[in-house]
Image: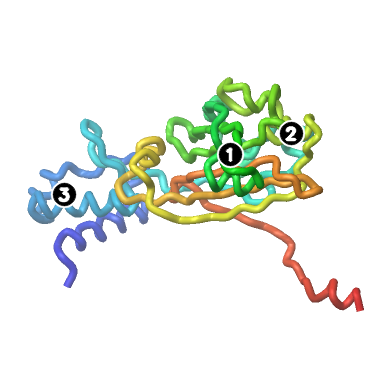
Amino acid sequence: MAPKWRELADKLAERIRSGEYAPGHRLPHIRTLVDAGEGSKATVHAAYKALEAEGLVTASRGHGTIVRPQTPLKRLGIDRYDKAKWRDGDEVAFIADRVASGRAYRRDEQTQTVSRIEAPSVVAAAHGLPAGAEVYARARLVKDGEQPTHVLTSYYRPEHVEGTRIVDPTPGPAGRGGGFRVLYDAGYEIDHMREELFARAATAEEARLLQLPAGEPVVEMHRTVYTADGTVVEFAIGVHAASRFAWSYDFQVPDSAQGKEEDR
């Protein structure tokens, strides 16, 4: 038999999922539920903490326990990198996600800092650089309105980006078309990329930056971007609040056997 706090948490969770408690709704004060016979103060408190850990509510002093929005952003796969968006227009990747999600956006929802640093080992390996080599690190914090969604740090070889807008720390994308357009104009047209995803617990600093509720995991992404000749022109590490994105991929299904038959 489930403990009393679990039963109460499940009852409240059902009201949230049914829409009875809509996003932005403040749950009853603990004392209200105690007086209504839902359990002791400790029971109600434990139920609210469980809802917070499950990402259904947020709690803060002075505001109470608030139902979180449950509609995540669409995080596009291949389509967010369509060259027509950034080469011919001004729809950088995070803006493409907003457009696909039907969400408003401002260019200043992406902040950034740029520094020249010694490449961490994973970055040096991705770029094929020796230990101790320097790279430019372009770190961004991206928000959806006032809520942070993810952090993304891109690492570049200095000879690829020195003197370009990529190393300009002005907040927002690196000019029209963003970083990919800057690389394109410098003669480094992106051709293909690899993305790897890892789910893990957030660090204390990530929880602070992304304003995560207790227990929410993050999705770490590694993106390696190549030109047609195999040159790595960007290696990026992103950390995404897991509940704030729905990842979407649409691609042609390969048939490697077809090519082998044609070679016979």
What kind of residue is marked 3?
A: His
Residue placed under numbered mark 1 in the picture: 98
Residue placed under numbered mark 3 in the picture: 45
- Residue 164 image point, x, y percent: 70, 24
Residue 70 is tagged as: none
Residue placed under numbered mark 2 in the picture: 183
The earlier-in-sequence mark between 3 and 1 is 3
> Which residue is found at the position 39% from the left and 40% from the top?
206
- Residue 213 image point, x, y percent: 32, 44
What kind of residue is marked 1?
A: Arg
- Residue 20 image point, x, y percent: 32, 50
Query: Is 191 situated left or right of 66 in this image?
Result: right
Q: Mark 1 and mark 2: span between their CA atoms?
A: 23 Å
- Mark 3 secondary-structure assignment: helix
Query: Is 40 situated left or right of 18 in this image?
Result: left
Tell me, yes or no, if residue 240 can be seen here: yes
Q: Mark 3 and mark 1: span between their CA atoms?
A: 36 Å
Query: Is 133 situated left or right of 225 in this image?
Result: left
Where residue 17 sits, quadrant-wise, is: bottom left
> Which residue is found at the position 43% from the left and 35% from the top?
147
